Every structure is written in structure tokens, then in C-alpha cells.
Image: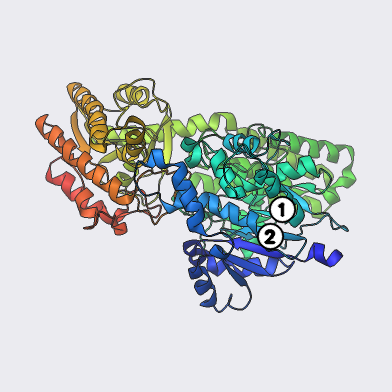
Amino acid sequence: MESSKTNFKTLVVITPADCQRLIGLYPRIIDNITYGDICFVGKVEVGDILNANPEIKGKVGFIDEDSIIPFDSVHKVVADRMKHILNGRELPRGITGWYYQQFLKMQYAFLCEDEYYMTWDGDTIPCRKLNMFTEGTTKPYFDLKHEFHEEYFDTLGIILPGLSKTIERSFISEHMLFNVEYMKELIQEIESNAVIPGAHFWEKILNAIPEDKIQSSSFSEFETYGTFVAKRHSDAYALREWHSFRLGGEFFNIDTISDRDFLWLSKDFDAISFEKGHSVREDNANLFDNPYYQEKLTPKQMLQAAQMEFKDGYKEVWDDDESIDHANESSGQFNNSDEGQSEPVKNRELMKKLRDILQKNPGFIENLPIDDLISCVYVELYGLRQLYDKEHFDRLEEELGQISNELEGAKAKKDAEQALHIIDTLISYEDMLPDNDLAASFIEKANYDDAFLRHIRDNTLVVIGDSHVNFFSGNENLSFIPIGNEVNTCTRKSDDPITTLHFGPCLAYKSNQYGSSNRFREKLDWALKNFILPDAKILCVLGEVDLRAHVFKQTARQGKDYKTIIDEILDNYMEFLLWLSDLGHEVLCWGPIASQNDTCPVTEEYPRIGTTAERNKATEYFNEELCRRCGENGIGFISLFSDMITEDMQTDEKYLSPDKVHLGQFAYPEVIEALKSIGVI
């Protein structure tokens, strides 16, 4: 009996692209998950990739995903659910893929011969050996994180009437240990719900989701199974807080992360994820993988310091975080805004507490946690590094190192009186640092001053709009830094006289409206009053978001063709451009780039509707019509769109950045020459 409990298969459900991308790290899955066979589940190409790798071949199994549930069967149901929205267009595979991989994990219960099976996300690598059972028992763990997505529980309440969110935390981690009998029981209960059409559980789940919510990631197998078991078998699992470094790809490079890095990460993290499209940002390079910083800080301290600078996006939180309530909540399309954030560690209180203990009990000197004391200050210093130039920051680090050495010396001599004096110095040192609550505004002001002075000095071209403004900064990856009023500029990688201003995911359709959800016009009014020179040259970058995510949604909703919808967008956009021109600015317009190919999965951050060919045809019309209207009104127009598309209206990806959505720096010289040729820089 015990053997069946503690020996089971682990399924890694993976796409060929992700398997190829991460295969160099998969030996760590084999080494750290030791309960039984590791089986990769995916297309036939996944098996080919595994067999071609000498470190993996023969050490893992492979299961053709279609042998569990045929993809085409699920795809047809999703297409039927969305037929009114699709309006005759082909459904991209990525929309189905989100649900399909969850259904595979559930259906495997009917193939499993063990009491349990575990699923493990293929973009996640364990940092240490996994223990999935409570110590000395065969009671499994539910591993919990902090996340809430409203639509998961909307669907749950339909497929399993009477069930709703049960615990404060989330059952969603990058893995789950399923009890076969409980999963079968769950599936049978879903299939017995006669109110919902469909024979198979996955048909009923899809039919329970409103058609306009299909793209809103509206089902979670983990939340559903966890809630079901918590209600029906409340004593079957033990609950455990799980910590995985979800944004690992923004701090570590897949190809260079080392054994030392994993050993350091294992102090605070069970696993690290490398999500598709994530890459190490310039301001994160040589930080988390730096041996010097690793010696000074724990991974938790390091990440908490880094997260002080996150204005939005997913954040790792711990049970002792003061802002744990409502952490990582979302609704609708997954996004990385409006999510909770961690508060700084209360460093000063900890230092004073340790000082009081030492003063009352001098013998405590032998156990004085010097690393913790120094880290209390260093974590705050690190979070404020943008306030200092490199020379100043290096000097502060050196001074802190000297204090650490003096404290080590006092401890070695068991000199409590000297240690108290040094701790007082350390507290005074920490007191001299700017308060964390004010640091963000200081940093924002410094960013503003730097960008504003350069704009005045060089009379720069100002590029305004959505995230595509980043291209004009010379950065391959998005590099936004705040300057005030929720407006960002970009880290400069070029000396060309250009200033970028990012206003968020704003729409051309709403560019001439106040009160939009993004507040584009309100933000622009602030920039025109406080930043942009009265007679500045302004390049407007809007429209790609409209074309990728909204045009074909509106064609279905309104029963109009895409050209009519685009004409309505351009009517508003031209009013905005003419208003800006009437203010005295030399206005130019950037034509939206070619659209992301359908070979890329639909992601939380970059939703899309329509096929690549359809979106590119729409973009072609948008650019042609915008160019014509701009010409009639004396507004300059430039675009690379025609260079980016193939004969069959697909997108040539050599032009794109790693996220396959934005323009990459391959095209930068060509665009700069175009701007120079018309005399705007």
C-alpha cells in the first residue's frame, strides 16, 4: 500500500517549442523528482526532441497527447463555442491550447495505474529535491500560492453547483499531486451535470463558459480539483506554502544559470519558472546571478528589494508580507496590472530588537546573526540603488562591508560592548538612507529630470503612444521607467535625439476621448503641460493594439466588415492628430507594424483575435488609409509594415523582438534613416 502512495508518474505537459527552449535544464527535473517515471506529454515532435538529446534520451518517457484526448476534438468544441465571435474565421490553436493542456492532466486519471500522479509545468525547474508527502506519513501536500482569478470560480460554480472558493490562498502552483480516485470522482460529478450540454467533462466545462469569456482563461484544473477535494475529502491533503520564482526568466538566463545559482535559490525557492517571452531586462542583468549579491542577500530579500520598484505585474509574496491581502488578483484577460505588491521588510525594528537582546544578554554575542544585520541595511540600499550614481553606490557598499568586518571582529573577540557600538553605527547608517516610502517619488523625479533636460537640450523628437514606443529607445526588450502621473519613458540605448513617452496599452480608437480606462488623454495633457516643449516634433504610435485585439471582436459584435470598423477608429484618431497639430506641434504618425504570427501561443499579456493573414490585411488597410488621411492634412507618415509581410500575408519574424509582438532592433537603422530623410531628427 505504501509503495502505491509514494511511487507515481510525473507528467510534464509541454509544447515542442518550450521543450526545445528548456531541454538543457530538464536533467534537474529528473534529478529532483524521484518518485517514479518522468513522462513528457505533447505532440510527436516533443518525443523527437527528447530522443535527440543525449542527456535526456532513455531517462524519461513520452506520451502522445492525442492518445489521451485528441486535440482536434477539443478544438472543434472551442470553435463551436466561439463561432459568433469568429464570424467564419479560423480559430487560432493557442486559444484551445490553454484549456486542452488542463484537460489532458485531468483525463490521465483514467489511464493511471497508481494511486497518484503528478503534473509538472514544463517551463518550471525545481531548485531542490521535491518532498510531496508530510514527514513520516503518506499524506500528500497541496502546495499553495497567492493568486486569484475571478473567472475560475465563475466556471467552478456552474460545473459544480454549490462549490465556491474555499481557502484564502490559491491551489495554483506549477504542479499538483492528483489522487486518481478523487479526480475520477470529480470528472464523474461534472459529467453528471445534466444542465450543461456535452458528454465528456471537457465539453461541459467549455459549454459552461460564456462565449465572450473563452479568451479570458476561464477555467483552472488546479483550483477546481483543490476546491473539490477540500469540500469532499477535507482531511486528505496537508496544506503547505509553496514558493516558486515565477518571473525567473527576467532575472536569469536559461543558458547561463549555474549550479551556484540553483543552490542559492534553493534557500528560499522550491522552483524557478522561465515563461515564454521573458528575457533578462537590462536593469536586472548581473544582479541575481552575481556572486557578490548572493553572498550579501538571500533570494527572498533580493526579490523583495527588486519588487519595491515594480509598479505593477505579478509579485511573489510570503505569508509574513503585510500586503498579502488581494495579492495577484485578476479578472478577464490575464494581465500584469492592478496586482498586489510586497512591502519592504521592517529592517530598523529587527536591528533594534537584536541590539536590545545583546544589551540585556552580552553572551548573545556568540549567536549574533551578523549576516542578517548587514542584510537588513543592504536590502534597503539595494532597493534605492537608482538614486545613486555608480561611484556613490559602490562607496556605500564598501562602507557597509567595512562595518560588517568590524562586527565580525567584535564577535570573534566576544566583545559585546564593541558590537553594541557598531550596531548603533549600523542603525545610524540605515537612518541616513532615504525612506523607502519616499524613494519611489525620488526615483521618479530623477527619471523625469534626466529625460526632460535631454528633451530641452537636444530638442528631441517625442514619441508618444503604447508599448511600441520602446523600439525608438534602441532597446530590444521593453524598458519602461516612470517619470510621473503613470507616464513612463524608456531606458536609452541610443544617442539619437529621441524621447519616448509610454502611456500604457492605449487605443487609437479612444485617443480623442477623456475618461478611457487607460486615461490616455489625461496623461497626455499632463505631459504637454509639464514635459513636452510647446513646438515639439511628436511621433504618434498607436493602432497595433486596436488591430490585434479589438477590430475583429467588433466586426463580430456589430456585424460590420473590418474596413468599416477601421474607418471608425481612424475618424477618432485623425481628430486627435489634428487637435495635436493645432496646438502648434509638428505631428507625425507611425503606421502599426505587422501582427504576431499564429505560430505564437496566445498569451495573457498579448491577446489577439483573427488569423495572422486577417490581422495583416486589416493592418494594411489601416496603414494605407491612415497614410492617405495624413497626406491630405499635412501630417507626416512613416511605416515599415510593407517590409514585414510575406506574399501570403504572414509576418517576417526577423523584424520582431523576442516577444514576437514588438518591433526588434533589426529595423532600427532603417527607421532612423527614414526619420533623418524627412528632417525630424
Q: Position of residue 351 (x, y in %)?
A: 74, 38
| Quadrant of the image occupied by residue 377 | top right
| Label 1: few (<14), some (14–19) or many (≥20) C-alpha neighbours in 10 Å | some
Residue nearer the viewer, 169 or 364? 169
Screen quadrant of the N terminus: bottom right
The residue pinned by badge 2 equals 110
Question: Is there a contact, CB below 8 Å, between mark 2 and mark 1?
Answer: yes
Q: Up-down: is 109 above or below 388?
A: below
Q: Position of residue 637 (x, y in %)?
A: 17, 39
Residue type at the position of mark 2? Phe
Could you tell whether 470 is left or right of 61 in the image?
left
Residue nearer the viewer, 157 or 395? 157
Residue 93 appears in the rendering: yes
Which structural element holds mark 1? helix
The residue pinned by badge 1 equals 184
Could you tell whether 533 is left or right of 327 in the image?
left
Q: Position of residue 243 (x, y in %)?
A: 68, 49
Residue type at the position of mark 1? Lys
